[in-house]
Amino acid sequence: MKLFFALTLFLLSHLMQAQYTQQIRGTVVDQVLKEPLAGATISISTGQKTLTDAEGNFRFKELPVGTYRIEVTVTGFKAAILDNIAVNSGKEVVLTIPLEAEIKTEQEVIIRANSKKNKPLNDMSAVSARAFTVEETQRYAAAVNDPLRMATAFPGVLANDDGNNNIIIRGNAPTGLLWKMEGMDIPSPNHFTQPGLSGGGISILSSQLLANSDFVTAAFAAEYGNALSGVFDLKLRKGNNEKKEYSLQAGVLGLNAAAEGPFSKKYKGSYLVNYRYSTLTLLNKMGILADNNTTNFQDLSYNIYLPTQKLGNFTVFGFGGLSDQVFEPARDSTKWESRSDRYRSDFFSNTGMSGITHSILVNSKLRVNTAIGTSFTKIGYDEDFTEDDLSLRKTFIDQYSTRNLLFNTTLYYKFSKQWNMRAGIILKGIHYKFFRRSPDHEDEPLREKLNQQGNTSTQQAFAQWQFKPSNSIIFNAGLHFLRLAHNHTSSLEPRLSAKWNISRRSSIAAGYGLHSQIQTLNVYFAQQELADGSMFMPNKNLDLTRAHHYVLSYNYRLAKNTQLKTEIYYQQLFHVPVATADSSTLSTLNIEYDYITDPLVNKGKGRNYGMEISLERYLQDNFYLTLSNSFYQSKYTAADGVERNTRFNGQYIITLITGKDFVSDRKAKTFGINIKTIMAGGLRTTPIDLAASQQQGYTVYREKEAFSEQNPAYFRTDLRLSMKWNRRHHTSILSIDFQNLTNRLNIFNQYYDKDKNKIVNSYQTGLIPVLNYKVEF
């Protein structure tokens, strides 16, 4: 018996002292050509060191769970530091670490390694650009693994509506954002997206699939085209090529499963696939969505890596999302509280893409990346009004469909450590089909406003150069060309930027770019009926919208993990489509959701200018904090020649994000609390003429006073609570995000309700709890 108790105590003691372990491994590569670097020294915060092998690979085995600091050094390259590398028991950490070439000058300079958190992956993005990590999409309160919702934590970015993830960047409409994935232009990767918009209800992409990526808000590098407000340049993570790993997730937003692993032990290729299904039934039962509102969506995303010995590396990747939402009015008319309760609607939005990329290192100076793919978007909206006798009257029909063939190739050439060049072409073949029947005003007969199908294409080309006269100075210059075959409109756009690292603590950067964007494609095919009954398309020959971007930024590192950044910008928009009537105030710069079918002409202007100041303390000692202030003006001029506020001129955005992890002694448990608070000026509105609305029976605006009024200030606080458990061979995370914790009802817009005979406010969403459980093994 004594032996039994002694053995029991020994085993318990052993278990209490046991630490769960995992490994960190990865590859060190040249920043420009992505060529593996052999002989690099990798140091980790435990004091361990190792060297990369002939293929640039390194490995640290059996590391206790926790966070680590990694430093990489190799002759001829600047040292690099990676802070806060999180190691959990359920998944290996696999890193790709690019190193920047060191420039030799006459005077020897000692370069000390610094952690450059948020430095963009694209080395030709010198201003208004930052990298974001997968960890940020998971950590930030209410980001729920969504890059767009995560981006609202950055300076100058605001959500257009709590009910979706469309974003306003520096006063620009949500239509101006470009999405790229693995170098290819892609359609909006969001469920419930609408024609021309960059967002939707929720992201199709899973954080399981994404690698660290870039977000750019002005003066884009020359490789980015057909965008005015911003760029999401997404990179995909390769699956684990040594062991199989899985992830299962269940929560309010549905069920999610991911799998990754090698094809065989002898082959370095890998697969990574993720699937999600949701009905949002829980939100219906919690009363957040109405009982007569049925919402479903599902998505699949994947990345398959296929390396070869001599023919380069191939990847097959893609995503697809299906989503639909049906609203059925109550059959009991006594439950109708407003006119909007009488509408039946059926909305679906399906989108996806698939591509194949090939990358080959031709020689020590040249790499060529080529990609081919296809994408599609199919969106439909059908609406009926329920009469007093419960019969249905058709009030709106809209169908939008595009199918695209994609091709692009990019050459990376490294003349020397000081000079390198990047050039490429981006081609897209488009098949389109558009149809719309809608009334001019509420309760009026439907009219056909769009009914076209056909083919067109876009062509883009770019070339950009980078010159580094020293380790502290960088110059970038380039040209971008964009052409729309439909009406032969085109634009040649210069891009310039420079950065000077004044000292180890401070840097200054400046950028300029001319940028252009094609109109939402169906705008070109809007129909107008002539007196003889024939149809013509007044917008067929619309030009591209253009903008000059000017940016100046200053960075100062206050402490090891704390920096102060200031950026001022000016955006001058021209060739903006506006209504043809001389007295009209309509401009495409104010597009919020719908696209415009009115006759347009490229005579409008606009300007966005402001200053952003942010104080950012990166994650250190399990604590981080960012306070950002944006002060801006957003103006437009329509055909009447009067400069007015745009819809999106809120004038200020103040954002605070912070969080703290509380880690147990053995680091097996971590409790996290993360908060995000946003205070911003309300969006602009046009006053409603109540008397005219009552007379006409529908909402009549005072167009001469367009956007002269402002909604009350927008305020929202989000809270995320999480608990992580590391166990032998698996990690589990339980989390709950409280979106709009204070349940503040921010005003969305106003309209005239014919049944109530008065002006009614519509509000954004209130408190939404998002519960989630995830296990990795």
Image: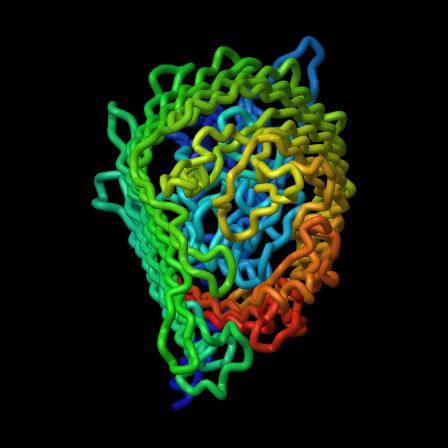
The N terminus is located in which quarter?
Answer: bottom left
In the rendered view, tell whether residue 198 sits above or below residue 328: above
**Picture coordinates of residue 603, whole percent (x, y):** 61, 31
Please report the residue visible at 64 percent of the width from the left and 35 percent of the height from the top. Answer: 128
The C terminus is located in which quarter?
Answer: bottom left
Left or right, residue 403 beside residue 217: left
Residue 453 visible to the viewer: yes
Left or right, residue 22 beside residue 217: left
Rendering colour mode: rainbow
Of residues 657 and 697, the one drawn nearer to the viewer in this rendering: 697
Left or right, residue 450 beside residue 565: left
Which residue is situated farthest in the front direction here? 532
Residue 664 visible to the viewer: no
Of residues 224 and 72, the one drawn nearer to the viewer in this rendering: 224
How many dots with numbers? 0
Quarter of the image holding residue 132?
top right
Which residue is situated farthest in the bottom direction here? 1
**Picture coordinates of residue 200, whole percent (x, y):** 47, 55
Quarter of the image holding residue 473?
top right
Please report the residue visible at 62 percent of the width from the left and 43 percent of the height from the top. Answer: 172
In the rendered view, tell whether residue 740 sits above or below residue 458: below
**Picture coordinates of residue 137, whole percent (x, y):** 53, 54
**Picture coordinates of residue 690, whole percent (x, y):** 68, 66
In the rendered view, tell whether residue 43 sits above or below residue 279: above
Quarter of the image holding residue 763?
bottom right
Please report the residue visible at 72 percent of the width from the left and 46 percent of the height from the top. Answer: 645
Of residues 537 and 732, the one drawn nearer to the viewer in this rendering: 537
